[in-house]
Each structure stands twice: as structure tokens, then as C-alpha cells.
Amino acid sequence: MRRTIQVVVAVAAAALASAAGTTSAKAGLIKGLLGGGCGSTAPVFSHWNDWSGYYFASNGGFESSTAGWSVAGGASVVSGNEPWSLGGAGSHALQLPTGASAATVVCYGLTYPGVRFFASGVKTTAKIHVRVFARSLLGVVSVLDGGSFTAGTTWAPSPRISTLFSAVAAPLGTKTMQLQFTVESGTARIDDLFVDPLLVKS
């Protein structure tokens, strides 16, 4: 059952492609719909009994400052790193006071429906809100409210946040997926952003 939704998505994509016309058109539709080529994956969260494979988002650890990110409201890169260094040796994280936000674009397709990262509150707990924006070639945007969660005062993995329904709601065609993180209360730090290709729970 846990893989059923992936099978359904694959079958639906193939059926759509079969009506798309030429072989090249079919291939283009499938590639645009399903995405791919986002990088190698590994079960980096296995320490927390999450055996799914994830790939590391570009500058997901903020070691290149905010390159590839859009930040607002006082968000800034600070010294400090999640202690497990899942994104490799690092020394920085992104700090966001109440009302601040940060957004980045990640490799996207219907087969890439989940994200996970590390978060902590600074001195007190912090409430973090996640939204997902999927944009089609025509500029049409679908939005998924990934919900909010409370980060404690020590580093810990975030819940797994599904982006699947944002993908399904978007029109067909090559898309980008923008992830937006907003702090609703407290001051938060985030680090080491990963994307789960299959969102299969152990």
C-alpha cells in the first residue's frame, strides 16, 4: 500500500503520454511530469528510523551563505551547524526571527514528493510554517500548505513534509518547486535540507 500512490502516478503519466502524439512528445511529457536527475540518494535519516533515500538540496546547509535562497524579514546565516552533519562537514545554519522567511527552488517532479531538514529554536521553542509552490511552464502556480511544527531548543529533524499534492495540482509540463519556510513565533534555525524522492515510510 505504501508504494501504491507511486504506481498510480506512474501509470497515469504513461497514459497521458500515450495520447501526446509523437515519440519525442511522449518522452518530453514524461520527463516534464516525473522529473529526475536530481542527484544520488541515501538513507541519511536512518538514525531516526527513516530508511527512505534523500538527496541533498543545493546549498541546503548554507555553507555558501544564502546563495540560491531568497530571504526576508531579518533571516541571516549564522555560525553553528546541526550536530550530525548529514550534509557534510559544515559550520553554518540559517537563523530566522519571528516573521522572517526563506525560500529556495529544488529539483522537482511527481516522483519527488517530500522534504526534510533540521531545525531548532533559539533559547525558546519556535514555530515553523512550510509552504510549497509548484510553477508550470505557463507560469501557473499551485500552492501546498505543508503545515506548521514546533522546533525544540535543540537540533532535531523536522517531520517529513509531503509535496505530492502540490505536484498533482499543477498543470503538466516542466516545473520548479519552491519551498518557503516562515517562522511564526520564536527564533528558529534551519540547516541541511534534503528531498525524499519517494516518500515511502519504513
Image (spheres, rainbow, N blue to C red):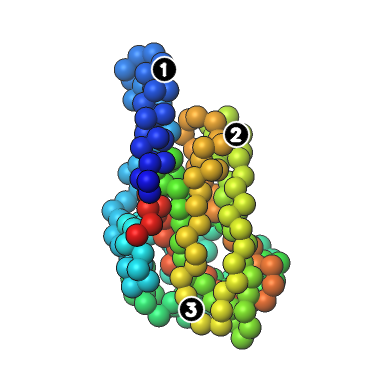
Identify the residue at image location x=41%, y=17%.
20
64 or 97: which is nearer to us?
97
Identify the residue at image location x=33%, y=73%.
47
Q: Earlier in the sequence, mark 2 or mark 1?
A: 1
Quadrant of the rendered image containing residue 129:
bottom right
Q: Is residue 147 left or right of residue 80?
A: right
Vertical order, 200 against 26 (above or below) = below
- Indicate the quadrant containing the C terminus: top left, top right, bottom left or bottom right: bottom left
Dot in front, 2 or 1:
1
Identify the residue at image location x=61%, y=38%.
141
Q: Residues under labels 2 and 3: Cα distance?
A: 37 Å
21 or 66: which is nearer to us?
21
Q: Which residue is mark 1?
A: 20
Q: Which residue is mark 2?
A: 139
2 or 162: which is nearer to us?
2
Q: Residue furthest bottom?
A: 123
Q: Earlier in the sequence, mark 2 or mark 3?
A: 2
Q: Residues under labels 1 and 3: Cα distance?
A: 48 Å
